[in-house]
Image (cartoon, helix red, strand yellow):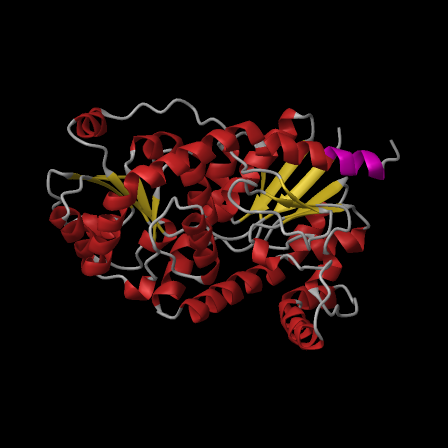
Amino acid sequence: MKKIAMFTMGTRGDVQPYIYLSKGLMKAGYDVVLGTHPCWRELVEGYGIHFEPVGPDIDIEKETTIIRGKSKNAIMSLLKTMNFIMKIIEGSSKEVYEICKGKDLIIVTHSQMGAVEAGVLGIPKVNVTLQTEMIGEKLRKQKFSEKLIGGFIARQAAKPTNKIRKLYGLKPVKSADEEMSDKLNLIPISKYVVDRNPYWEEKNILTGYWYDAEEEYIPDEKMKSFMEGGEKPVVLALGAMSFEAESEKEKLDMFVNAFQKTGQRAVIQGFQKTLKDYELPDSMIAVGSIPHSWLFKHAKCVIHHCGFGTTAATMIYGVPSIPVPHVLDQLGFAMQLEKKNVATKHINAKDLREQTIISAIEEMNVTYADKKRNAELISEKIAAENGVAEAVRLIESVMEEGSGK
Protein backbone atom coordinates (compact mmCIF):
# COMPACT_ATOMS: atom_id res chain seq x y z
CA MET A 1 0.00 0.00 0.00
CA LYS A 2 1.44 3.37 -1.06
CA LYS A 3 2.02 5.82 1.81
CA ILE A 4 1.22 9.53 1.66
CA ALA A 5 1.79 12.28 4.25
CA MET A 6 0.62 15.88 4.40
CA PHE A 7 0.98 18.61 7.02
CA THR A 8 -0.85 21.86 7.71
CA MET A 9 -0.92 24.60 10.33
CA GLY A 10 -3.61 27.10 11.31
CA THR A 11 -7.29 27.26 12.17
CA ARG A 12 -9.93 24.69 11.27
CA GLY A 13 -10.27 26.22 7.82
CA ASP A 14 -6.60 25.40 7.21
CA VAL A 15 -7.18 21.76 8.16
CA GLN A 16 -10.59 20.87 6.72
CA PRO A 17 -9.66 20.73 2.98
CA TYR A 18 -6.97 18.17 3.75
CA ILE A 19 -9.38 16.06 5.77
CA TYR A 20 -11.54 15.74 2.66
CA LEU A 21 -8.53 14.98 0.48
CA SER A 22 -7.25 12.41 3.00
CA LYS A 23 -10.61 10.63 2.97
CA GLY A 24 -10.61 10.52 -0.83
CA LEU A 25 -7.10 9.10 -0.94
CA MET A 26 -7.91 6.50 1.73
CA LYS A 27 -10.97 5.43 -0.24
CA ALA A 28 -8.69 4.96 -3.25
CA GLY A 29 -6.51 2.58 -1.22
CA TYR A 30 -3.69 4.80 0.07
CA ASP A 31 -2.24 4.86 3.59
CA VAL A 32 -2.55 8.53 4.58
CA VAL A 33 -1.08 10.50 7.49
CA LEU A 34 -2.28 14.03 8.29
CA GLY A 35 -0.04 16.02 10.64
CA THR A 36 -1.13 19.24 12.32
CA HIS A 37 -1.57 20.99 15.69
CA PRO A 38 -2.30 18.63 18.62
CA CYS A 39 -5.54 20.56 19.23
CA TRP A 40 -7.00 19.09 16.02
CA ARG A 41 -6.50 15.44 17.00
CA GLU A 42 -10.18 14.83 17.81
CA LEU A 43 -11.31 16.54 14.60
CA VAL A 44 -8.96 14.55 12.34
CA GLU A 45 -9.39 11.19 14.05
CA GLY A 46 -13.16 11.71 14.04
CA TYR A 47 -12.97 11.18 10.28
CA GLY A 48 -10.99 7.95 10.73
CA ILE A 49 -7.75 9.51 9.50
CA HIS A 50 -4.29 8.64 10.88
CA PHE A 51 -3.30 11.76 12.84
CA GLU A 52 0.19 12.82 13.85
CA PRO A 53 0.66 15.76 16.28
CA VAL A 54 3.04 18.42 14.96
CA GLY A 55 4.09 21.54 16.83
CA PRO A 56 3.25 22.83 20.32
CA ASP A 57 0.03 21.86 22.11
CA ILE A 58 -1.77 25.21 21.97
CA ASP A 59 -5.26 26.46 21.14
CA ILE A 60 -4.36 27.81 17.73
CA GLU A 61 -7.68 29.59 17.14
CA LYS A 62 -7.37 31.43 20.45
CA GLU A 63 -3.73 32.37 19.80
CA THR A 64 -4.36 33.73 16.31
CA THR A 65 -7.43 35.61 17.55
CA ILE A 66 -5.31 37.39 20.13
CA ILE A 67 -2.78 38.35 17.44
CA ARG A 68 -5.50 39.66 15.11
CA GLY A 69 -7.11 41.58 17.96
CA LYS A 70 -3.91 43.58 18.51
CA SER A 71 -3.90 45.02 14.98
CA LYS A 72 -6.71 46.71 13.06
CA ASN A 73 -4.57 46.97 9.93
CA ALA A 74 -5.25 44.06 7.53
CA ILE A 75 -1.68 43.85 6.24
CA MET A 76 -0.07 43.99 9.70
CA SER A 77 -2.61 41.50 11.04
CA LEU A 78 -1.82 39.05 8.24
CA LEU A 79 1.95 39.48 8.61
CA LYS A 80 1.88 38.97 12.38
CA THR A 81 -0.32 35.88 12.05
CA MET A 82 1.92 34.47 9.31
CA ASN A 83 5.08 35.10 11.34
CA PHE A 84 3.55 33.32 14.33
CA ILE A 85 2.58 30.30 12.23
CA MET A 86 5.90 30.25 10.36
CA LYS A 87 7.85 30.11 13.63
CA ILE A 88 5.81 27.05 14.61
CA ILE A 89 6.43 25.49 11.17
CA GLU A 90 10.18 26.10 11.41
CA GLY A 91 10.27 24.64 14.91
CA SER A 92 8.35 21.56 13.74
CA SER A 93 10.63 20.61 10.86
CA LYS A 94 12.38 17.73 12.64
CA GLU A 95 8.99 16.21 13.55
CA VAL A 96 7.86 16.56 9.94
CA TYR A 97 11.12 15.01 8.71
CA GLU A 98 10.65 11.92 10.90
CA ILE A 99 7.03 11.46 9.80
CA CYS A 100 8.03 11.82 6.13
CA LYS A 101 10.48 8.89 6.33
CA GLY A 102 9.30 5.86 4.37
CA LYS A 103 6.53 7.69 2.54
CA ASP A 104 5.97 7.39 -1.20
CA LEU A 105 4.59 10.91 -1.68
CA ILE A 106 4.40 14.16 0.31
CA ILE A 107 1.48 16.46 -0.42
CA VAL A 108 2.80 19.94 0.34
CA THR A 109 -0.19 21.93 1.55
CA HIS A 110 -0.61 25.70 1.30
CA SER A 111 1.44 26.01 4.52
CA GLN A 112 4.43 24.68 2.51
CA MET A 113 5.19 22.14 5.26
CA GLY A 114 7.09 19.10 4.09
CA ALA A 115 8.53 20.67 0.92
CA VAL A 116 12.13 20.90 2.12
CA GLU A 117 11.93 17.67 4.11
CA ALA A 118 10.65 15.74 1.09
CA GLY A 119 13.52 17.10 -0.98
CA VAL A 120 16.11 16.07 1.61
CA LEU A 121 14.65 12.56 1.73
CA GLY A 122 14.28 12.31 -2.06
CA ILE A 123 10.50 11.77 -1.85
CA PRO A 124 8.25 12.97 -4.72
CA LYS A 125 5.86 15.79 -3.86
CA VAL A 126 2.66 17.42 -5.05
CA ASN A 127 1.64 20.95 -4.06
CA VAL A 128 -1.66 22.52 -3.03
CA THR A 129 -2.41 26.25 -3.41
CA LEU A 130 -5.52 27.89 -1.97
CA GLN A 131 -4.82 31.46 -3.07
CA THR A 132 -4.53 31.80 -6.83
CA GLU A 133 -2.72 35.14 -6.40
CA MET A 134 0.26 33.14 -5.11
CA ILE A 135 0.71 31.31 -8.42
CA GLY A 136 3.34 32.84 -10.69
CA GLU A 137 2.50 33.80 -14.27
CA LYS A 138 5.50 31.91 -15.65
CA LEU A 139 4.20 31.97 -19.24
CA ARG A 140 3.80 35.77 -19.39
CA LYS A 141 6.60 37.92 -20.75
CA GLN A 142 7.39 40.44 -18.02
CA LYS A 143 8.74 43.95 -18.26
CA PHE A 144 12.12 44.63 -16.65
CA SER A 145 10.48 46.60 -13.81
CA GLU A 146 8.07 43.73 -13.14
CA LYS A 147 10.98 41.30 -12.96
CA LEU A 148 12.72 43.49 -10.39
CA ILE A 149 9.62 43.81 -8.22
CA GLY A 150 8.77 40.13 -8.67
CA GLY A 151 12.29 39.12 -7.73
CA PHE A 152 12.16 41.16 -4.54
CA ILE A 153 8.80 39.67 -3.55
CA ALA A 154 10.05 36.16 -4.38
CA ARG A 155 13.12 36.61 -2.16
CA GLN A 156 10.97 37.80 0.73
CA ALA A 157 8.55 34.90 0.28
CA ALA A 158 11.47 32.46 0.26
CA LYS A 159 12.79 33.54 3.67
CA PRO A 160 10.73 31.01 5.71
CA THR A 161 11.73 28.23 3.29
CA ASN A 162 15.39 29.19 3.56
CA LYS A 163 15.29 29.06 7.36
CA ILE A 164 14.22 25.42 7.09
CA ARG A 165 16.73 24.68 4.33
CA LYS A 166 19.47 26.01 6.61
CA LEU A 167 18.55 23.37 9.21
CA TYR A 168 19.61 20.73 6.69
CA GLY A 169 22.73 22.50 5.46
CA LEU A 170 21.14 23.46 2.13
CA LYS A 171 21.90 26.60 0.12
CA PRO A 172 19.17 29.27 0.08
CA VAL A 173 16.78 29.49 -2.86
CA LYS A 174 15.90 32.75 -4.60
CA SER A 175 12.21 31.88 -4.75
CA ALA A 176 9.89 29.52 -2.86
CA ASP A 177 8.85 28.28 -6.32
CA GLU A 178 12.12 26.37 -6.44
CA GLU A 179 10.78 24.07 -3.72
CA MET A 180 7.50 23.42 -5.54
CA SER A 181 6.63 20.23 -7.36
CA ASP A 182 7.44 20.36 -11.07
CA LYS A 183 4.67 17.79 -11.66
CA LEU A 184 1.46 19.03 -10.07
CA ASN A 185 -0.03 21.94 -8.13
CA LEU A 186 -3.62 21.31 -7.05
CA ILE A 187 -5.98 24.27 -6.65
CA PRO A 188 -9.13 23.15 -4.78
CA ILE A 189 -11.36 25.87 -6.22
CA SER A 190 -14.11 25.57 -8.80
CA LYS A 191 -13.47 26.74 -12.35
CA TYR A 192 -16.96 28.23 -12.15
CA VAL A 193 -15.77 30.59 -9.40
CA VAL A 194 -12.22 31.38 -10.60
CA ASP A 195 -11.11 31.50 -14.23
CA ARG A 196 -7.91 29.66 -15.02
CA ASN A 197 -5.08 32.11 -15.67
CA PRO A 198 -3.76 31.54 -19.22
CA TYR A 199 -0.23 32.43 -18.03
CA TRP A 200 -0.07 29.57 -15.52
CA GLU A 201 2.10 26.55 -16.22
CA GLU A 202 0.20 23.40 -17.17
CA LYS A 203 0.86 21.79 -13.76
CA ASN A 204 -1.48 24.29 -12.03
CA ILE A 205 -4.93 22.68 -12.10
CA LEU A 206 -8.28 23.84 -10.72
CA THR A 207 -9.83 20.63 -9.43
CA GLY A 208 -13.09 21.94 -7.99
CA TYR A 209 -13.75 22.35 -4.26
CA TRP A 210 -12.91 19.55 -1.86
CA TYR A 211 -15.88 18.45 0.22
CA ASP A 212 -18.06 15.43 0.82
CA ALA A 213 -21.61 14.77 1.91
CA GLU A 214 -21.82 15.35 5.64
CA GLU A 215 -23.57 12.80 7.81
CA GLU A 216 -27.26 13.51 8.22
CA TYR A 217 -27.58 16.27 10.80
CA ILE A 218 -30.65 16.29 13.04
CA PRO A 219 -31.19 19.64 14.80
CA ASP A 220 -32.38 19.70 18.41
CA GLU A 221 -35.94 20.75 19.14
CA LYS A 222 -34.96 24.34 19.94
CA MET A 223 -33.18 24.77 16.60
CA LYS A 224 -35.90 22.93 14.67
CA SER A 225 -38.59 25.12 16.23
CA PHE A 226 -36.65 28.29 15.45
CA MET A 227 -36.11 27.36 11.81
CA GLU A 228 -39.78 26.51 11.36
CA GLY A 229 -40.92 29.65 13.20
CA GLY A 230 -40.49 32.19 10.41
CA GLU A 231 -38.59 33.24 7.30
CA LYS A 232 -35.13 31.87 6.54
CA PRO A 233 -32.58 33.53 8.85
CA VAL A 234 -29.33 35.29 8.16
CA VAL A 235 -26.40 33.21 9.45
CA LEU A 236 -23.59 35.08 11.19
CA ALA A 237 -20.49 32.89 10.90
CA LEU A 238 -17.31 34.89 11.37
CA GLY A 239 -15.16 31.81 11.97
CA ALA A 240 -11.97 32.50 13.92
CA MET A 241 -12.90 36.21 14.01
CA SER A 242 -15.60 35.32 16.55
CA PHE A 243 -13.29 33.30 18.82
CA GLU A 244 -12.90 36.11 21.33
CA ALA A 245 -9.85 36.53 23.51
CA GLU A 246 -12.31 38.33 25.78
CA SER A 247 -15.94 39.39 25.68
CA GLU A 248 -16.77 41.49 22.59
CA LYS A 249 -20.20 42.83 23.48
CA GLU A 250 -19.75 45.95 21.36
CA LYS A 251 -19.18 43.92 18.19
CA LEU A 252 -22.09 41.57 18.86
CA ASP A 253 -24.35 44.57 19.66
CA MET A 254 -23.65 45.94 16.17
CA PHE A 255 -24.97 42.80 14.51
CA VAL A 256 -27.92 42.27 16.84
CA ASN A 257 -29.05 45.91 16.44
CA ALA A 258 -28.60 45.73 12.66
CA PHE A 259 -30.66 42.54 12.47
CA GLN A 260 -33.44 44.08 14.56
CA LYS A 261 -33.53 47.33 12.59
CA THR A 262 -33.73 45.47 9.26
CA GLY A 263 -36.20 42.88 10.54
CA GLN A 264 -33.90 39.89 10.00
CA ARG A 265 -34.11 36.63 11.89
CA ALA A 266 -30.60 35.39 12.62
CA VAL A 267 -28.52 32.38 13.63
CA ILE A 268 -25.31 33.39 15.44
CA GLN A 269 -22.22 31.19 15.58
CA GLY A 270 -19.25 32.01 17.80
CA PHE A 271 -19.11 34.83 20.38
CA GLN A 272 -19.31 32.18 23.11
CA LYS A 273 -17.78 34.33 25.86
CA THR A 274 -19.97 37.31 25.02
CA LEU A 275 -23.15 35.23 24.80
CA LYS A 276 -22.75 33.81 28.32
CA ASP A 277 -24.25 37.01 29.77
CA TYR A 278 -26.11 38.20 26.70
CA GLU A 279 -29.85 37.98 26.13
CA LEU A 280 -30.78 37.59 22.47
CA PRO A 281 -34.23 38.59 21.19
CA ASP A 282 -36.63 35.79 20.18
CA SER A 283 -35.83 36.48 16.50
CA MET A 284 -32.26 35.22 17.01
CA ILE A 285 -30.62 32.04 18.23
CA ALA A 286 -27.05 31.21 19.25
CA VAL A 287 -25.61 27.88 18.07
CA GLY A 288 -22.36 25.96 18.32
CA SER A 289 -20.78 23.81 15.63
CA ILE A 290 -23.36 22.86 13.00
CA PRO A 291 -22.39 21.38 9.61
CA HIS A 292 -22.45 23.99 6.85
CA SER A 293 -24.17 21.41 4.67
CA TRP A 294 -27.26 21.73 6.87
CA LEU A 295 -27.03 25.27 8.21
CA PHE A 296 -26.27 27.08 4.96
CA LYS A 297 -29.03 25.24 3.09
CA HIS A 298 -31.49 26.69 5.61
CA ALA A 299 -30.06 30.23 5.47
CA LYS A 300 -31.20 33.26 3.55
CA CYS A 301 -27.60 34.47 3.33
CA VAL A 302 -24.37 34.17 5.31
CA ILE A 303 -22.36 36.98 6.88
CA HIS A 304 -18.84 35.59 7.07
CA HIS A 305 -15.12 36.41 7.22
CA CYS A 306 -14.38 34.82 3.83
CA GLY A 307 -11.98 32.20 5.06
CA PHE A 308 -11.25 29.61 2.38
CA GLY A 309 -13.57 26.95 3.85
CA THR A 310 -16.57 29.19 4.49
CA THR A 311 -16.25 30.86 1.09
CA ALA A 312 -16.23 27.43 -0.54
CA ALA A 313 -19.23 26.29 1.51
CA THR A 314 -21.40 29.22 0.41
CA MET A 315 -20.71 28.28 -3.21
CA ILE A 316 -21.12 24.55 -2.65
CA TYR A 317 -24.49 25.00 -0.95
CA GLY A 318 -25.74 27.87 -3.13
CA VAL A 319 -26.20 30.67 -0.60
CA PRO A 320 -25.38 34.40 -1.08
CA SER A 321 -22.84 36.18 1.13
CA ILE A 322 -22.19 39.39 3.00
CA PRO A 323 -18.37 39.30 3.27
CA VAL A 324 -16.51 40.79 6.25
CA PRO A 325 -12.84 40.01 5.45
CA HIS A 326 -10.25 40.72 8.14
CA VAL A 327 -6.95 39.90 6.40
CA LEU A 328 -5.69 40.05 2.82
CA ASP A 329 -6.29 36.45 1.79
CA GLN A 330 -9.89 36.77 2.99
CA LEU A 331 -10.25 39.94 0.93
CA GLY A 332 -9.18 37.95 -2.13
CA PHE A 333 -11.87 35.34 -1.52
CA ALA A 334 -14.45 38.09 -0.90
CA MET A 335 -13.64 39.61 -4.27
CA GLN A 336 -14.16 36.22 -5.94
CA LEU A 337 -17.71 36.19 -4.59
CA GLU A 338 -18.37 39.79 -5.58
CA LYS A 339 -17.14 39.13 -9.12
CA LYS A 340 -19.66 36.29 -9.48
CA ASN A 341 -22.46 38.51 -8.13
CA VAL A 342 -23.27 36.16 -5.28
CA ALA A 343 -22.26 38.66 -2.59
CA THR A 344 -22.78 42.24 -1.54
CA LYS A 345 -19.87 44.68 -1.57
CA HIS A 346 -17.61 43.51 1.27
CA ILE A 347 -17.28 45.32 4.60
CA ASN A 348 -13.67 45.78 5.65
CA ALA A 349 -13.23 44.67 9.26
CA LYS A 350 -11.93 48.13 10.20
CA ASP A 351 -15.14 49.67 8.80
CA LEU A 352 -17.44 47.34 10.72
CA ARG A 353 -20.19 49.42 12.29
CA GLU A 354 -23.91 49.05 12.82
CA GLN A 355 -24.68 51.27 9.83
CA THR A 356 -22.34 49.43 7.44
CA ILE A 357 -23.99 46.13 8.42
CA ILE A 358 -27.45 47.65 7.88
CA SER A 359 -26.39 48.98 4.46
CA ALA A 360 -25.06 45.55 3.43
CA ILE A 361 -28.27 43.82 4.54
CA GLU A 362 -30.34 46.37 2.61
CA GLU A 363 -28.18 45.80 -0.48
CA MET A 364 -28.71 42.05 -0.09
CA ASN A 365 -32.48 42.47 0.21
CA VAL A 366 -32.72 44.60 -2.93
CA THR A 367 -30.51 42.31 -5.05
CA TYR A 368 -31.34 39.00 -3.39
CA ALA A 369 -33.18 37.29 -6.26
CA ASP A 370 -30.22 37.67 -8.64
CA LYS A 371 -27.60 36.69 -6.06
CA LYS A 372 -29.54 33.64 -4.92
CA ARG A 373 -30.11 32.46 -8.50
CA ASN A 374 -26.41 32.92 -9.36
CA ALA A 375 -25.33 31.03 -6.24
CA GLU A 376 -27.67 28.13 -6.98
CA LEU A 377 -26.51 27.87 -10.62
CA ILE A 378 -22.85 27.73 -9.52
CA SER A 379 -23.72 25.17 -6.82
CA GLU A 380 -25.23 22.85 -9.44
CA LYS A 381 -22.08 23.05 -11.59
CA ILE A 382 -19.78 22.48 -8.59
CA ALA A 383 -21.60 19.26 -7.71
CA ALA A 384 -20.71 17.87 -11.13
CA GLU A 385 -16.99 18.69 -10.76
CA ASN A 386 -16.35 16.20 -7.92
CA GLY A 387 -13.21 18.01 -6.80
CA VAL A 388 -11.84 15.37 -4.42
CA ALA A 389 -12.11 12.59 -7.02
CA GLU A 390 -10.38 14.80 -9.59
CA ALA A 391 -7.55 15.59 -7.14
CA VAL A 392 -7.11 11.89 -6.32
CA ARG A 393 -7.01 11.04 -10.04
CA LEU A 394 -4.29 13.63 -10.66
CA ILE A 395 -2.25 12.48 -7.65
CA GLU A 396 -2.48 8.88 -8.84
CA SER A 397 -1.22 9.89 -12.29
CA VAL A 398 1.86 11.50 -10.70
CA MET A 399 2.52 8.43 -8.54
CA GLU A 400 2.14 6.08 -11.51
CA GLU A 401 4.51 8.21 -13.55
CA GLY A 402 7.04 8.14 -10.71
CA SER A 403 6.86 4.35 -10.46
CA GLY A 404 7.33 3.96 -14.22
CA LYS A 405 3.88 2.55 -14.89
Frontmost residue, 39 versus 86: 86
Frontmost residue, 131 versus 240: 131
Relative to 305, is 285 above or below?
above
In this picture, residue 211 sits left or right of residue 141: left
Q: Is residue 404 visible?
A: yes
Frontmost residue, 356 versus 217: 356
Frontmost residue, 294 versus 167: 294
Point out residue 354 in the picture as x, y percentages from the top left corner.
Answer: 19, 58
So how many labels did they put on this image? 0
Question: Which region shows up in magenta?
Answer: 396-402
How would you classify the magenta stretch by its main secondary structure?
helix
Of the 4 image quadrants, the one containing the C terminus is top right
Point out residue 49 in the picture as x, y percentages from the top left corner.
Answer: 57, 33
In this picture, residue 138 sits left or right of residue 315: right
Q: Quadrant of residue 244?
A: bottom left
Point out residue 352 in the picture as x, y percentages from the top left corner.
Answer: 27, 61
Q: Is residue 325 magenta?
A: no
